[in-house]
Amino acid sequence: MRHGWLLIPCRHAHELLSERMDKPLAKGDRLRLWLHLRICAMCARIERQMDLLRAAMRRPSRVRKSSDRAVPMMVPPRLRMPPTESQFISRM
């Protein structure tokens, strides 16, 4: 048995974190990743960020149709309406 077979570099940990989002990892990979995340604060932070992104993607969207959006009053009136064709052409 090689020495250090449990220790993996950060690059490999990132690959396993990404792979874990798509499919379950093999036991050995899970163990190596678990150990790496316990000793590497930066990779543990990346894991938390990936988990937050995954959770955000699973939430239902709150985006409304553009016609339903209200324009904030702090936006100057000239910017509230899309430019007319003549205004668009004059800018070119």
Image (cartoon, grey):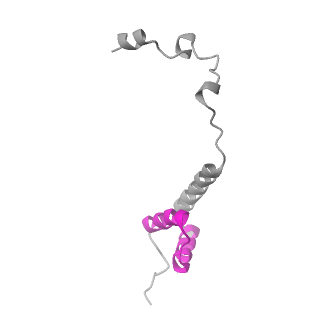
Q: Quadrant of the C terminus?
A: top left
Using the image as rendered, state which of residue 77 and residue 10 is in the foreground: 77
Percent position of residue 86, x then y: 40, 9
Secondary structure that dominates the magenta span = helix
Vertical order, 32 against 40 (above or below): below
Percent position of residue 12, x then y: 44, 68
Residue at 62% x, 49% y is: 56
Q: Residue furthest left?
A: 92
Count of residue discs: 0
State yes or no: residue 31 in magenta.
yes
Vertical order, 1 against 74 (above or below): below
Q: Quadrant of the N terminus?
A: bottom left
Residue at 63% x, 53% y is: 55
Instruction: Determine the image quadrant of residue 49.
Output: bottom right
Residue extent of the magenta highlight? 10-38
Using the image as rendered, state which of residue 66 and residue 44 is in the foreground: 66
Percent position of residue 69, x then y: 63, 26
